[in-house]
Image (cartoon, rainbow, N blue to C red):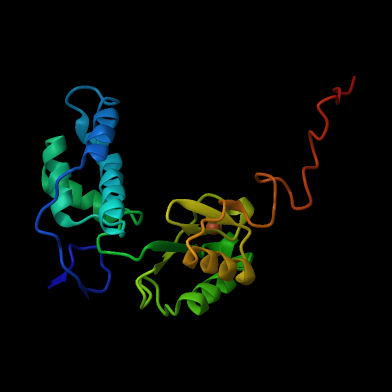
């Protein structure tokens, strides 16, 4: 059955589950999260709870997404109208309202990443996965490719986010190598793929290079 709860994406054929229950891991997380908010303000925990749902779906099905019935479970848990949960889940791009592949490739194409080569990263993702368009999943079900706006890591642009990890200073070659590693079941450490220390300049830090340095008189 085609399902679209209003995120504007192309309607696809996929099945919505008919039931959802939080597992023990999620229940423990929910207890911790809800305790951060004053009594009567538990609705403020809607975003963390949607993340908890998405992680549970990843554990149970291999696909990190938020079915509508799980949004209803969040609404019930937080004693808020389901529509208010739907509004949040469909507004934020980080919540997937339809099943995705095992790995979520999120390519930042905003100006700093574009100037630093996001077109090449996109092309490499397409070449390595066979995916042609944004929002599509590869034929083998391993990868979904999404275009995202600035991820707030422009200093190490271009960025390819895989699930929750930022891979920085990407280019075509590094992108293809990363995807090949993921296919092999490896998970390379996130961060700069150019070996950059944090967000220091390419070539290494240029300030505060010595702990012994004394301020000028
Ligand atoms: S423009 Fe890509 S991280 Fe900011």
* Residue positioned most to the top: 217
Q: Is residue 119 visible?
A: yes
The C terminus lies in quadrant: top right
Give the residue displayed 63% in from the left and 51% down from the top: 155
Depth order, front residue of 139/147: 139
Q: Is residue 145 left or right of residue 83?
A: right
Corner quadrant of residue 98: bottom left
Depth order, front residue of 44/175: 175
Point out residue 183 in the picture as x, y percentages from the top left corner: 47, 67
Q: Is residue 18 left or right of residue 210?
A: left
- The correct choice, above or below, for 161 with respect to 173 in the image is above
Ligand number 1: quarter of image = bottom right
* Residue positioned most to the front: 184
Q: Is residue 80 visible?
A: no
Point out residue 79 in the picture as x, y percentages from the top left corner: 11, 36
Corner quadrant of residue 116: bottom right
Depth order, front residue of 175/44: 175
Point out residue 152 in the picture as x, y percentages from the top left corner: 52, 49
* Residue positioned most to the right: 217
Q: Is residue 21 left or right of residue 113?
A: left
Give the residue displayed 52% in from the left and 53% down from the top: 166
The N terminus lies in quadrant: bottom left
Point out residue 145 in the picture as x, y percentages from the top left corner: 41, 68
Total numbered badges shown on the rendered structure:
0
Give the residue displayed 58% in from the left and 62% down from the top: 113
Q: Is residue 54 left or right of residue 187?
A: left
């Amino acid at each position: 059955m085609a399902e679209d709860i209003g995120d504007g994406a192309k309607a696809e054929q996929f099945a919505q589950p008919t039931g959802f229950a939080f597992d023990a891991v999620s229940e423990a997380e929910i207890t911790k999260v809800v305790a951060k908010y004053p009594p009567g303000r538990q609705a403020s925990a809607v975003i963390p709870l949607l993340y908890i749902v998405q992680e549970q779906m990843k554990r149970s099905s291999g696909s990190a997404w938020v079915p509508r019935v799980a949004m209803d479970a969040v609404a019930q848990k937080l004693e808020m109208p389901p529509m208010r949960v739907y509004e949040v889940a469909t507004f934020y791009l980080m919540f997937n309202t339809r099943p995705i592949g095992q790995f979520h490739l999120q390519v930042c194409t905003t100006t700093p990443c574009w100037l630093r080569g996001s077109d090449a990263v996109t092309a490499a993702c397409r070449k390595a996965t066979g995916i042609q368009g944004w929002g599509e999943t590869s034929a083998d079900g391993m990868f979904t490719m999404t275009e995202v706006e600035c991820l707030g890591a422009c200093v190490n642009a271009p960025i390819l986010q895989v699930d929750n990890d930022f891979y920085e200073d990407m280019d075509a070659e590094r992108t293809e190598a990363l995807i090949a590693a993921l296919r092999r079941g490896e998970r390379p450490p996130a961060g700069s793929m150019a070996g950059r220390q944090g967000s220091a300049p390419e070539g290494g830090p240029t300030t505060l290079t010595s702990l012994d340095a004394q301020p000028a008189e």
